[in-house]
Amino acid sequence: MTSGGSGELNHLEGDQVVSAIERACESDLRTALRLVARYSAYWWSRGLQDEAAAAAERVLSMLGRTVPVGLDEEYLLAVIHGAASAEQEQVELAQQIVLTATGPFRYSVTVLLWSLVFGPFEPAAVVEDVLERNESGDAWARAAVELCRGYPGLTRAAPSDAAQALRTALGRFRMLEDRWGMFLALTALRQVVDEPLDLTTDALRLAEELCLGEETARLLCERGDLYRALGKLEDAHEDYSRALAIGEHADFAETVAAARLGLARTARHSGNLPAARAHLSSVLAFPELEDAHSEALHELAVLNASEASA
């Protein structure tokens, strides 16, 4: 079974992977498809889903609806990566590959990526069947199965059972010293517990270690929300400010909007209404972000009411 971790890189990194796939597309589509599958965990563990999608889309555009003999799971992984632009017939072929499989996947990461990408749109019974089939996989796959079993919305597990499954997954990934798996388990677990602050801090540390910029900024905003709810306004301000800096540097518009909304609310609670209004004005400059725009308008109404009653 092929490991789910990101260690098997065959000495290729970053652009070298893309170049190798490009060359293979011109001469050997089977090799190109194998490379897409082999680097699946590498891409996802580094937040490079867009890179994975681009590579998969190139290979799928040349394969069309032809699944090379013996490469069913590789084709499935390519469709998972390129799901946003894959043809409906390709998605149906991928679904058929999953439904007709009888044993565990050969690539440990497949059970995780399939569960995260297609699992939410499948009946819970189908997800549970896929997870059960992969319980006999390697140590990484077994950890991933527990992660998926507890992941919010994927199975019919009761909240307490889901939390226990996620704790089991976290423990197994720790034993494997797999930081990406630990990060995924922590981010899921924090959604099903009553007091997620410590878990959020642990997930944030791992996101920073893994250089996951967008996830780091998102978690900073979410921890800022937790601090603000606890009345720790200085801590909240620091987290939102860090998230804003990351978002502006990397041009993450949604992150910038979320950070400024958090800063506006923190400023209002601190009594600094002019600063709150300035942050909201910045959010309203992004009308294409409808949800953030609506939140900013609501917060502006709250701010106006505060000023009127002052």
Image (tube, grey):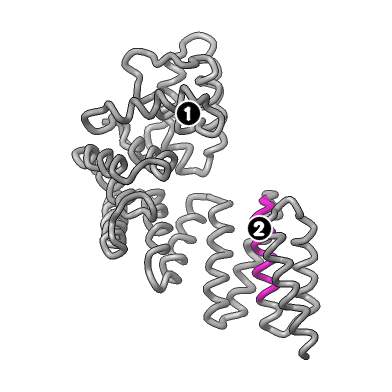
Region rendered in magenta: 252-265
Camera-near label (1 vs 2) is 2
Image position, residue 93 (x, y; %): 40, 23
In the image, residue 208 above or below residue 86: below
Q: Is residue 161 magenta?
A: no
* Chief secondary structure of the magenta portion: helix
For image coordinates 70% across by 80% down, the residue present is 268
Element at badge 2? helix
The extreme bottom residue here reads 310
**What's the CA distance linking mark 1 and mark 2?**
40 Å
Residue lying furthest top in this view?
Answer: 27
Query: Which residue position holds label 2?
Result: 291
Mark 1 crowdedness (10 Å alpha carbons): few <14, some 14-19, many ≥20 = few
* Residue 12: mark: 1
Q: Is residue 297 left or right of residue 224?
A: right
Q: Nearer the viewer, residue 96 or 22?
A: 96
Q: Is residue 66 above or below residue 296?
A: above
Question: Could you classify mark 2 by the number of other residues whose Cα lies within 10 Å: few (under 14), some (14-19), or many (20 or more)?
Answer: few
On screen, 68 above or below 288? above
Residue at x 65% of width, y 64% of height = 259
| 66 vs 240, nearest the viewer | 66
Residue at screen point 75% across, 68% down: 279
x and y, in percent, of residue 288 in the image: 73, 50
The kind of residue tagged 1 is Leu
- Where is residue 202, by image quadrant? bottom left
Q: Is residue 255 magenta?
A: yes
